[in-house]
Image (spheres, helix red, strand yellow):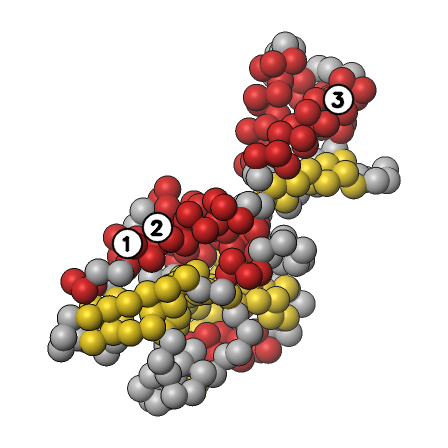
Amino acid sequence: MKKLKRSSRLVDMTYFLLQHPHEVISLTHFSERYQAAKSSISEDLVIIKEMFEDEGYGALLTIPGASGGVKYMPRMNKDEAETLVHQLVLDLNKPERILPGGYLYMMDVLGNPKLLHEVGRLFAAALYDKEIDAVMTVATKGIPLAYAVGQHLGVPVSIVRRDHRITEGSMVSINYASGSSDRIQTMTLARRSLAAGSKVFIVDDFMKAGGTIRGMVDLLAEFDADLVGIGVLVEAAEVSERLVDDYVSLTKLTNVDAREKQIELLSGNILDRLH
C-alpha cells in the first residue's frame, strides 16, 4: 500500500480493524502496511480506541509481548441494543406471522443482511469476555444468523444437518428427542467441521422446548468440544419443560393463538447480559 496521510490512514486502519474482530494485529503489520513509524501507528490507535469507546463500537485491547499488538472487540451500548431489540419486537409482533404449531414466519428477518449484521454484533457484545472458537447452528434457518454472529466473533461456522451429505465426508451422527413433538430424530456434523477441544457458541432462530439445541449440545461431546453459550433470536415462553437452561434470547414469544390470530412478543434476556 502506498504511503497515506494520517487522515486516510485512520480511515483505512479503522476499516481493517472492523473487518478483523478478535484478531491480534501487530504494530509491525500496520507499520509495514502504511509505511509509517510504529510511534505514529501507536498514536493513531489511541485515536481509534477513544472513538470506538466513545461511540460504543467496541474496545481496542493492547496485547503486550513480542507477539502482541491490538485486538478489536465488538461491543454495543445499552441504548443501541434496546433500540435493536425493540425494532425486532415490532417487526415480529404481527398476527400474519403465525404458523401452525405456534411457530413464526421469520424468513424476511433472517434474509435481511443489514438487520442480521446488527443482531450478530449484539450477540458478540454479549459474549465480550468469552473465548470462542466456532459458532454452531442447525440447517437451514439458523445459518444466516450463525454467519452474522461468526463474522463479529471472527470465527468459523459449523452447520449441523438432519441428513447425510456425501460431499461433507465422514460424519458424526446422534439421535435426539425433539422437545416439541417428542419424536426421535437424527442430526449429523462433518468430522472436519469442528476441531477437538473447540469452545463453541450455539445459535438458533427459534426455540420452543429446546430439543434441537439440546441435541447440538450432546453432539459437542462427540467432538470433545465445550459449550460456551447458547443464543436464540426468539424463545417461546409458554412451554411445559425446557431442555436447556442457560441461554440468551433477543425476543420472547409470550402469547400466540393461531385461532384468534393473537400474538405477543417481549424483549428477551440479552439486555441483561451486556457488559
Q: Residue furthest left?
A: 259
Q: Residue furthest right?
A: 65
Residue 181 position (above or below residue 79)? below
Q: Secondary structure at mark 3?
A: helix
| Crowd band around label 1 with a 10 angstrom C-alpha radius: few (<14), some (14–19), many (20+) | some
Q: Which mark is residue 87?
A: 2
- Say which residue label 1 marks: 91
Estimate the x, y position of residue 92 in percent, counting from the top left.
28, 59
Residue 38 position (above or below residue 117)? above
Estimate the x, y position of residue 118 in percent, counting from the top left.
44, 46
Rendered-image quadrant of the N terminus: top right
Rendered-image quadrant of the C terminus: bottom right
Residue type for callout 3: Glu
The answer to whether 274 appears left or right of 64 in the picture is left
Say which residue appears at 62% left-offset and 29% top-offset: 51
* Alpha-carbon span between mark 1 and mark 2: 6 Å
Q: Earlier in the sequence, mark 2 or mark 3?
A: 3
- Say which residue label 3 marks: 43
Callout 1–callout 2 Cβ contact below 8 Å: yes
Q: Earlier in the sequence, mark 3 or mark 1?
A: 3
